[in-house]
Amino acid sequence: MEEIKVNDLETEVNGKKVLNGVDLLIQRGKIHVLMGPNGSGKSTLANVIMGNPKYNVTAGRITIDGEDLLKLKVNERAKKGIFLAFQEPVEISGVNVMNFLTTTYTNLNGKNPELRKEVVQTMQELNLPDSFLKRSLNEGFSGGEKKRFELLQVMILKPKIAILDEIDSGMDVDSVKLLGEITKKLSKDTGFLMITHNDHVLDYIKPDAVSIIKNGKIIRSGDYQLIKQIREKGYSEIL
């Protein structure tokens, strides 16, 4: 089973310590939900796993199937099957959606003459029109469109491990429901680290593992029952 293990991870950003001994396991075929207050280190952890050079790892290890992930460049991590859906996707003028998907897919998996057909079919599941393919990357996209495009990439690229950094933020009720249903469907083959503030998406999926992070450290871990406790007792009491 493909998996990412994070062991005793410590990280600094601009000389400030953000992660303070994080331990986490993300397994292919399972959904792991990560929750916590603003500034607790959720997005930092996502960026460190993906290899963002802004973040300096000062201690600990991250491995993928036993291999040292920290020694790999960003593109090498992507080829290992890791995908990060950004909280704030970048706009790139002049690069249309189809060209981006074709280039990315080819670099990771080789050429696929049926790719356009697969993309169009997948877009129908996400309620995105065919004209979406001609638009510049994230330029002029609504918040919901940006998040659906991130989800489209997961569906087309089929990574081993997908990290969704608050992909549900800014989504309306129908989009959150769709996100939950598709994540549940994809989790048969892809492992998910779903970072969220909004537990509404958890109405549509039942995560295999739940962790709560505060001040750069995992302070509670459990299964779906932990979500129920948060809903019954309140977030602050659990923390």
Image (cartoon, helix red, strand yellow):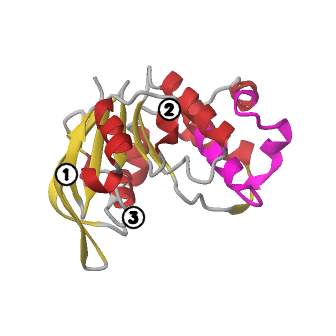
Distance from the alpha carbon under mark 3 to that under mark 2: 22 Å
Q: Residues within 10 Å of mark 2 (few under 14, many from 20)?
A: few
- From the viewer's side, name the closer residue of 37 and 28: 37
Q: Which residues are magenta?
A: 124-151
Q: Which residue is mark 1?
A: 219
Residue 29, given in percent of the width and then of the height, sits at 38, 24
Identify residue type, mark 2.
Asp
Farthest-out residue, right: 131
Mark 2 element type: helix
Tell me which residue sits at (80%, 44%) in the image.
132
Residue 68: name its quadrant.
top left
Q: Residues within 10 Å of mark 3 (few under 14, many from 20)?
A: few
144 inside magenta stretch? yes
Question: Is 127 one of the magenta-colored residues?
Answer: yes
Q: Residue at x 43, y 28 (%)?
A: 190
Q: Quadrant of residue 59?
A: bottom left
Q: Earlier in the sequence, mark 1 or mark 2?
A: 2
Q: In the image as oriented, which residue stretches furthest toward the bottom? A: 15
The answer to the question of whether label 1 and label 2 lie on touching residues, with beta carbons closer than 8 A, is: no
**Residue corresponding to mark 2:** 203
Q: Position of residue 131 (x, y in %)?
A: 85, 42
Compared with 173, 94 (above or below) is below
Comes first in the chain, label 1 or label 3:
3
Q: Report the residue marked by disc 3.
A: 38
Q: Tell me if I can see residue 183 in this picture.
A: yes
Q: Kindly identify the amino acid type of the residue bearing the numbered disc 1.
A: Ile
Quarter of the image with the N terminus is top left
